[in-house]
Amino acid sequence: MTNRAEMTRRDIMKSGAAAATLTLAPGVTLMAFGGTAEAAGRADAGKRWGLLIDASKCSEDCNDCVTACKVENGWGKDAEHGHISDEQAPEWIRKVTLKDKSTGRTTSAPVMCQHCEEPPCVDVCPTGASMQRVDGIVLVDKHICIGCRYCMMACPYKARSFVHETITDQVEQSPRGKGTVESCNLCAPRIDSGRIPACVEACENAGHSAILFGDLKDPDSPISKALKQYPSVALRDDFELNPGVRYTNL
Amino acid sequence: MAMEQTIYRELKATPGVWQVAALLLAFLAAAGGAWFYMEHHGHAVTGMNNQIVWGLPHVFAIFLIVAASGALNVASIASVFGEKAYKPMARFSSLLAITLLVGGLAVVVLDLGRADRLIVAMTTYNFTSIFAWNVLLYNGFIVVVAVYLVLQMMRRLDYKWVRLGGLVAFLWRLALTTGTGSIFGWLVARPGYDAAIMAPMFIIMSFSFGLAMFILVLVTLFKLNDRPIGDELLKRLGRLLGVFAAAVVYFAIVFHLSNLYATEHGAYERFILLNGGIYTLLFWGVQIVLGGLIPIALVFLNPSRSSTLLASILVVIGGFAQVYVIVIGGQAFPLEIFPGYEVLEGFHEGVVNPYTPSIWELMLGLGGVALALFAAGLGAKVLRVLPTNLSDANLAAKG
C-alpha cells in the first residue's frame, strides 16, 4: 500500500517537474525529476487547465462536489475531526452562499484553489515545494514542503490547509502528510490519465453541471467558448493573478 | 587610544550565575519537551490552525530576530560611528546579536511542520521568496558578526579592520531587518500587511527592542559578577532608547495613518484601533502607552539608572505586544474574498478568526528566549567579551 502510494506520489511530482524547471530557474532538485518523455506527456505545456463555475446552476443545498473531493483525496474523515478543531480541519474545497449587498440576491458556489497564473503561494515558498505545472495546475510537492505555512499567509483565497495531525488510512492516488501544506490540485492524477476532476464529475452526476472543466488555451474548448460568450469574473480580480478558476452568474 | 586599556574578562561562575544558568536550562528542557509533544501529535495540540497559521512561536521568533539585529547597535555606534564610550560594550553587543538570532531561528525551525527537513530549506532555494533570501541573510549575519567579533578581539590588529568589519555587519543587519519586515510587507493579499513601510518600521523596531534587550542582559551579567556600571552611562543608554522608542511610535502612527487614508484598509484599521478586542487593547494599552509613551517619559523626564532599566523592560513588553498585533492581528482580521457580497454560509468567511495560544507554544517561545540568554551567558563565560569596569569614572579616565 505504502509503496504504491509512493509510486503515485512520485509520478505526480514527475509530471509537475517540467513546470518547475521553467518557473524556478535555480530549482536544481526539481529539475532532477523532469525531462522524461513520460512526464512531458503528462503535464502538457500546450494546455492550461481551468474551471468555469456557473453559480446559477449551483444548488445551495447540494454539497456533492465537496463530498467527491473528500472521497477522491481522502480528507475530511470523521476520524480526523475527532482530534482537531474545525479551524484545523482540511478544506480543499468549500461551498459558500453569498448575498449581493446591494441587490439582496443570493447565490452559492464552490471555492477551491484558484490555480492562478501568477500564484503568490509559489512566489513565497522558500523551497519551491509550492509549484505550478506547465499546464497551469498549482500544487504542493510534499517531498520538499517544510511546513512553514508562508504559502497559506500569501493565498488570497484561503485555499490551503495544513495537515495538523498524523494521517491514517490514506487514499492511494492522493498521498498526504502531517506537517505539510495541501490544497486542491485540480485532481492532477485524474487529468493525467485523461479523466476530469472529481468535483466536476460529481456536479454532472448530480444533474447540475455547474462546473465546466477544460483547456483555457484551446479556443475551441467548451470552456473557452463559454468564457467568450458570457460575462465571468475572477475572485479578487484586482490582484491581477489571473486565476484559472472563473465564476459566472455570481 | 586610551580606550584600549579596557580590560575584558570572562564571567566568573558565582553561585548567582549558576542559579540563572540552571533556571535557563529548565526553560530549555521545557521547550524541548513542548517541541517533542508538538512534533509527535502534530500542530493539532497547538492553538494554531488554518486561519491563524502563524502563532505565538512566531511572535517570539520575530521579536528575537528583530531584537538580534538591534542588539548590534552598540557595537555599530562604536565601530562605525566612532563613539568611544560604547567601545567597551561592543564585543558583548556583537555576541548578544548572534545569540538572540540563534534563539529566534530555533523557535521558527522547531515550529516547522517538518523540522526534520531543515536541510531542504538550507539547500533548495526559490529566489522569488523573501523567506529563501532570509535564510541566507540570517546565516550570513551569524558569520559576518562572528568575524566582526573576532576582529574586535584580535589584540594587534589595525583598528581600520574592526571599522570595516563593523560597517559590513551594520549594512548586513539593515538588510536582514528589511528582509524580516518584508515577510509581511510583501503579502499583498492581507490588508493588515501589504505595506512597504513594514521594512523600515522593522528596522526602527529592531533599534529599540535590541537596545532594550542589550541593556537588560548587560546589567544583569554585571550585577551577577559585581562589576560596576556607571549611572551616567545608563542614563545615556536610556536617552538613546527613548529616541528609538519615540521613532517606533512615530512609525506606528505613519503606518496606521497611511492605512486610514486608503479606503480599502479602513476596515482593518477600525479593527486594530477601535473594535478589535484584545488587539486594540494590546495596541493602545501595551504597545503605545506602556511600551512607548511611558518609557519615553521615564528616560527624558526622570533620567536615572532605574528609569533606564524600567524603560528597557517596558520597551521589551511593548515590543512583544507590537509584534503580536502585527503577526496575529493581521491574520485574525478576515480576508475579503468576495467584495460586495455578504457571506451567508461558508468556512470562517468574513469573521474574525479566534486564536488562543496553547501552553506548548508558550513553552517553545520562552525556550527561544532562554536559548538566546543562555548562549550569551555561556559566551561571556568562555570569551573575553565583557569589560571588568564600566563605571563612569573609569570611562571618563579613558575617554
Image (tube, coloured by chain):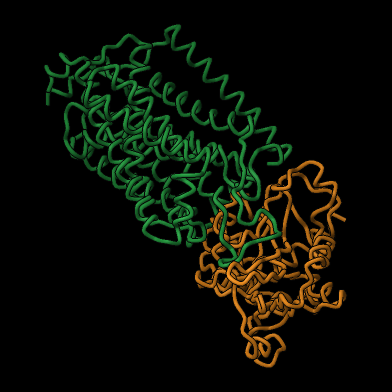
Q: At 49% across and 58% down in the image, what residue appears?
A: B129
Which of these two is toward me, A68 or B237? Answer: A68
Which of these two is toward me, B66 or B114? Answer: B66
**Quarter of the image where the C terminus of chain B is located:** top left
Display colour for chain B: green
**Quarter of the image where the N terminus of chain B is located:** top left
On the rendered structure, is B308 left or right of B113?
Answer: left
Q: Position of residue A227 (x, y in %)?
A: 64, 86
Q: Position of residue B192 (x, y in %)?
A: 47, 52
Q: At 75% across and 43% down in the image, what residue appears?
A: A84
Which of these two is toward me, A191 or B237? Answer: B237
Q: Residue furthest bottom?
A: A220
On the rendered structure, is B154 left or right of A30?
Answer: left
With respect to residue B350, does B34 lie above or below? above
Q: Chain letter for orange, please.
A: A
Q: How many marks?
A: 0
| Residue B199 in sight in this render | no
With respect to residue A65, does A246 lie above or below? below
| Residue A133 lies in quadrant | bottom right
| Residue A34 in sight in this render | yes
| Residue A62 lies in quadrant | bottom right
On the rendered structure, is B130 left or right of A179?
Answer: left
With respect to residue A120, does A170 lie above or below? above
On the rendered structure, is A114 left or right of B333?
Answer: right
| Residue B46 lies in quadrant | top right
Q: Residue furthest top?
A: B15
Q: Position of residue B21 (x, y in %)?
A: 49, 16
Q: Position of residue A41 (x, y in %)?
A: 72, 80
